Every structure is written in structure tokens, then in C-alpha cells.
Image (spheres, rainbow, N blue to C red):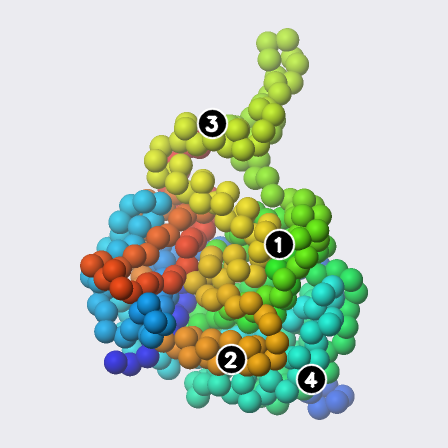
Amino acid sequence: MKHFAAIALLAATVCLAQTPASTSPGPTGLPDAQTDSQAPPPAASITVRSSLVVVPALVRTKSGQLVYTLKANDFILTDDGIEQPLHLEQDTGDQPLALVIVVETGGSGAAHLEQYRNLGPLLDNLVGNIEHKVAVVGFDSTPTLLHGFTPNLEFITHSLNTLDAGDKQAAVLDAIVFSVDMLSKQPTTYRRAILLLSETADQGSHTSLTGALHAISDTNTTIYSVGFKTTQSEIGHEASKLQSDDPGPEHGCFSRDYGTDANGKPIPPPESRATQNFDCFAELLPPLRLAKMAEIAARNALRHNISESVAHLTGGEYFKFKDVKTLDHDLFTISNHIPNRYVLSFHPQSPAPGFHSIVLKLRDSPYLSAEARNGYWVNADEGTSTPQP
């Protein structure tokens, strides 16, 4: 059976800029990084213009062997609890790939830079024999484009071999949003992927959890991450800084602003945010309730392990960093899995604005497991008008 590869989430009607990053040679003979790469990461402004949702899926046996023989009716996919008719794409193995390698150079990442050198041969395996373009982004307190998109892997290897240590921060979310925005400007005929080499907790991002969730789940980008553990004290300290609350509509149930009473005094919200969320869920209809619960769960997951969470959100894979030997093995595994995914697609029956929860299961296959993205985002100007508390 021919190998499968992830195709674009958006149909041909997606309105995305398609100008690739500059790869003109600089004074050293290597393509220059963009001059504005030091600027703060762009806001999450990617817009879905199509009702087509694409869900790449990896199917394995309990022993880890890949399975290639399934049909569309072997899968069951629900969107906010509602089962969707599925279509299985065919013959996508030759689709070109746009890949951004995102490397933490600051924080705890500075101690690992030497271990990323000499990865050139593994990059050949990672992109395979298909048309490709690869870029490198380094980040500490700020994401920086170290090398623009190029098909020349020697340039990419040189960038990885000459990484410099950054400051003490590790703005993981900012770097991801920065890279997703770069990929959004690539032609929609390219499948898009990020290889993230970072610690598991954010330190210093300006992007909110909701903004990051929106950006990550609003595109077809698949994220493969290799993460090294952030200490528990750092996780608790830095996670508390992240802007995690989505206030919702003014004076709404999920808002912390309940308006004023008859005497003009502010109405206090519940003491516990968790209690408020629980009370608000009870007011939502089942599909919206599931979607809101999934959105809050996704944001909370980003607070505790970004590397693992973004992989699950996008249908990629997460690996724990141990040493150079396991890194080589993990990258080899990723290179094998990228082109061997089933590519399922569906048209949402109820495209309400906001985050949608996707659950993919196998029909009558208890000995197999399926891994796929677990959500996508619909902007308010594209979904059906559905009032929310």
C-alpha cells in the first residue's frame, strides 16, 4: 500500500499568503535570516476559509508496528461528540514538505546545543526524497530566524552546528506561534511540520495560552517534539505567569466580570475558577459543553507540558529527551512516521465558532491504536452564529 502523508487542513479556498522566506545568499554564502526576526512573534491571525478539516492519523498495533490496510469506514471520528462522515485521501506520498526546526538556545536549552550538532545525515532521512524546504528558528526570550526556508540541507546543518547560547529565558509558545506563522505563508500544496527541541515548560512568552491554542489548532501544521524536563519548581513558577483565562463575552458566565447589581456594585465571581467553570458547563448544550471542556483542558495541558501538549493537539508525536543516542533514534522514528499517516477529512456538520474537540477511534479493532490531532479552531466570522453564556 502506498505511504500516506499529511495534506493541508485547508482547502484551495484558504486565504493564506504564499510568499516563502528569503533564501538569497548573504556575505558568507549562506542565505540571510530575515532582518525583522528579532521582532515579537506575530499575533495568531490565521483564518480558516474552508469547511474542510483534515485529520492525519497514525495507526499501530500494540507492539508498535504500523498498519497500512484500513479503509475510511474502519475509523470513527466525532467532532464535539457528533460522528462525522469521513473521506480517506489517496496517493499523497509525494506531497512536498515545509519543515521548521525550532531549537531552544536559551534557558536549559543552552546545555544541549552541542548534542544537536552533526545531525545532517538524520535530516536527509527526515525529509526523504520528496520536494522540501527547511528553516531553522532559535529561541531564548525571543524567537529568531536563523535560516530561512531552503532545500539545501547543508545550510541547515551549518546553522545547527553553529548555534550560540542565548539568555536565561525559554519562550516556547512565542517560538511555536512564530514558526506556525512562517509555515502559514508557504504554499498550501505543502504539508507543514515543526520539529521542536525544547524544555517542557514556558519561560517568558508573551503569547497567551488561548492565543497559542488558537494558532496551533487553526492550521494544518503537525508538531513533532523532543522535550527535556523542566524542573518542578520552574514549572510551577513559570506556569503561574501564563495568561490562561479566556474571559469570554463581557458579563458572560465564563467571564470574571459579572457586571453590577441593582445598586451599581460589582457582582463578585465564584471564589474558585474551577467552580465557575463547572457551573458554566451546566448551562451549555452538550456539543458546546464538550467543546468548552476540551478547550480548557487543552490550555491547562499547555501550562504543564508544552512539548507533549502541542504534539497531541496537532497529531504529531512527543519524545522525552535523554541523550544523543535516543535523539538519533527519535528522529529516525519521526522520519518513518511522517509519510505513513492515513489522511482523513470531513466537512463539519456544526461549525460553531471556537475550539472543536476531535476524537478518532477504530471500529472493531481493539488491538490497534490510532493517533490523530485532537482539535481544530473555527473563527467567529466563519462558524454558525451560536450564542454562548
Position of residue 228 measured from the top left corner of the image (x, y, whole percent): 62, 66
Helix, strand or loop for disc 3? helix
Q: Are marks 3 and 2 in contact (CB under 8 Å)?
A: no
* Residue type (three-letter) at the residue carrying disc 3: Asp
* Residue type (three-letter) at the residue carrying disc 4: Asn
Helix, strand or loop for disc 1? loop
Which label lies toward us, 3 or 1?
Answer: 3
Q: Do the residues labelled 4 and 1 touch (CB within 8 Å)?
A: no
Residue bearing the label numbered 2: 329
* Residue 311 or residue 255, whichever sits in front: 311
How packed mark 3 is, by other alpha carbons closer than 10 Å (few <14, some 14-19, many 20 or more), is some
* Residue type (three-letter) at the residue carrying disc 1: Ala
Instruction: Assign the N terminus to one quadrant of the image.
Output: bottom left
Q: Quadrant of residue 340?
A: bottom left
Residue bearing the label numbered 4: 161
For the residues labelled 4 and 1, the Cα–Cα distance comes to 31 Å
Position of residue 322 measured from the top left corner of the image (x, y, whole percent): 60, 72
In the image, residue 188 sits, relative to residue 361, either above or below, namely below
Residue bearing the label numbered 1: 43
* Residue type (three-letter) at the residue carrying disc 2: His
Residue 32 visible at all: no
